Image (spheres, rainbow, N blue to C red):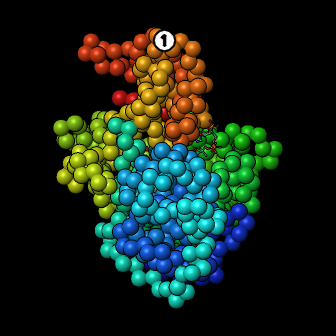
Amino acid sequence: MNFAQKLSGIAARYRDKPAVVFEGAVYTYDALDREVSRYAAMLDHIGVRVGDRIAIQLPKRMEFVFLELAVLSVGAVALPLNTDYRPEEVHYFLSDSGSRFFFTDRERFLRAEEILSALPELRTLLVDASNAKSCGSMAHELENADRNFQRTYPTRGDDVAVICYTSGTTGRSKGAMITHKNMISNTTALHLAWEWSDRDVLLHVLPLFHVHGLFVALHGALNAGATVIMHEKFDARRAWETIDMGVCTILMGVPTMYQRLMNEWDELDRKPNLQNMRVFISGSAPLLDAQFRRFEQQTGFRILERYGMTETGMNTSNTIDPAGRKGQSVGYPLPGVEIRVCSPDGKDVPPGDVGEVWVRGDNVFKGYWKMPGKTKESFHGDWFMTGDLGYQDHEDGKRLYLVGRAKELIITGGYNVYPKEIENVLQTHEAVKEAAVIGIPDEDFGERVVAVVVAGKDMPGVSSESLIRFCKDQLAGYKCPKQIFFVDELPRNAMGKLQKNLLAERYRESAKTQLPMRQI
Ligand code: MCA
Ligand code: AMP
């Protein structure tokens, strides 16, 4: 089945009920479904065909929601892009994916115009403006689309619905191909596990261009016939004020958001009314035990932590029954998801021992776009090897704990950063002889990206600010180092291999909080 068709079927059952309330504007299920149909007609009118990749780089707004579901409805493949990606990054995603259409806003188009002209096969459509010089206007195409268009959902379950780019250890991002079947199975598993119902009201504060905000939060709610109150941007004070109105039942966020909510809680003279709240859910990055306990002390709610990946959707979750939730554990395999914890030679390790987490199930993606080698490397038979290190509870052999990562990855505020990508950019700066990028503890972001740099002898005057600015010109802001440390040389072992663990230890001293994950 096509995932958008499933949601359209649900919309037919809840016609007059609010589906999404976005910044004061209410869209009923009927209005949402009609807009998706109108957008699908527009895609058909501009020549979108089954399997075409359609890139979307838009701030959080309703057009994003309509477009994504319309793309799925016509059997094309949606490619959501982080709004903060710089033109060079966007160019890579558009060219690597061979996207035929790019929906964006005027501001982002003007920034990327020159670089986009190098992609003659690509047609750009502006969502918020009339025709610009080298692109079209979505409003214009919507007007000219066939008003009698009927959605036919020309896909099978195994067809790709969305490609989400995830960074890679080599610095080159990989497009994870997520199928309709993946989306349906994972949404269904979460529906059961979290007991979603049409009485739920989700406060949606996450970005829409990632699996967390799009699949887990938005799709999860629409699949249940629930209502989504959607904020354009996360703001802790505003989130508490909205919850205080007494209609919300679910909040989903990354640990940085919970950290900010807790700090804000202390500032509030009158604490919010949480009477209607059912569950606070956290994921995308490790939630510290101290955060789990502080939130419970403040609010009386135990945060429900779950664990997922772009490639697999959600894998494990703590129980919906608060009594079964445990800080530092990411819970149990979701219905239909199998988990193994394996040694490097592919054998199951006994409960209590640390190994790599492997995942199998209908939730596991189809592979990396045009990277059969990388796809093969990531699987052992039909088991996907996550690169996350963990152990299963030695008592029940099932409850999962994550303790680190086999891959060199920094998670900052819920976003993944692979050091290699940043090192590659720094190393193109004329003053940089060598650069090593590491994550150090940060109270707000969990981990903070910092760079340790050896400057060339003939470039003594280079400043941290100029190197950070250099990175910001080419990389999304969250990837850029927050600090640069200059050293005479980087520590290496006898074989000449860079010893990042020594650097991490040295600079960890400068941070006061505990590191949420060990780099192994
Ligand atoms: C923004 N900045 C950051 C981050 N976010 N720096 C480091 N890490 C970050 N996460 C920087 C900006 O570049 C900017 O820098 C400055 O902070 C202010 O930007 P602003 O947009 O105002 O930031 P914010 O609103 O404070 O954003 C913090 C945030 C956001 C709300 C926590 O990062 C966020 O929405 N994170 C959620 C990520 C997410 O959805 N991940 C799910 C991935 P400057 O001032 O220098 O320009 S999916 C996934 O991981 C799997 C499937 C899973 O399990 O869910
Ligand atoms: P992404 O590639 O952006 O989908 O990020 C997936 C990665 O986020 C996983 O491989 C984990 O390393 C991490 N992750 C997601 N949820 C959690 C969690 N609850 N605790 C610790 N790490 C998590």
Image coordinates of residue 152 in percent, x first then y, are 41, 82
Quarter of the image for residue 413 reads top right
Quarter of the image for residue 291 reads top right
Residue drawn at x 23%, y 47% as measured from the top left = 373
Query: Which quadrant is the N terminus positioned in?
Result: bottom left
Tell me the quadrant of ligand 1: top right
Query: Which quadrant is the C terminus positioned in?
Result: top left
Residue 247 appears in the figure:
yes
Q: Nearer the viewer, residue 177 or 298?
A: 177
Quarter of the image for residue 33 reads bottom right
194 over 281 or under it: above or below: below
Q: Nearer the viewer, residue 129 or 17?
A: 129
Q: Nearer the viewer, residue 79 or 130?
A: 130
- Which amino acid type is shown beneath numbered disc 1? Asp
504 over 327 or under it: above or below: above
Residue, far front: 133
Residue, far bottom: 148
Q: How many marks?
A: 1
289 over 235 or under it: above or below: above
Mark 1 surroundings: few (<14), some (14-19) or many (≥20) residues within 10 A: few
Residue drawn at x 77%, y 40% as measured from the top left = 267
Question: Is 376 situated left or right of 97 in this image?
Answer: left
* Element carrying mark 1: loop
Q: Name the residue tied to disc 1.
A: 458
Residue drawn at x 49%, y 20% as measured from the top left = 431
Residue 478 appears in the figure:
no
Residue drawn at x 30%, y 68% as measured from the top left = 158
Question: Is 276 situated left or right of 312 in this image?
Answer: right
Image coordinates of residue 136 in percent, x first then y, are 56, 67
Image coordinates of residue 18 in percent, x first then y, are 64, 74
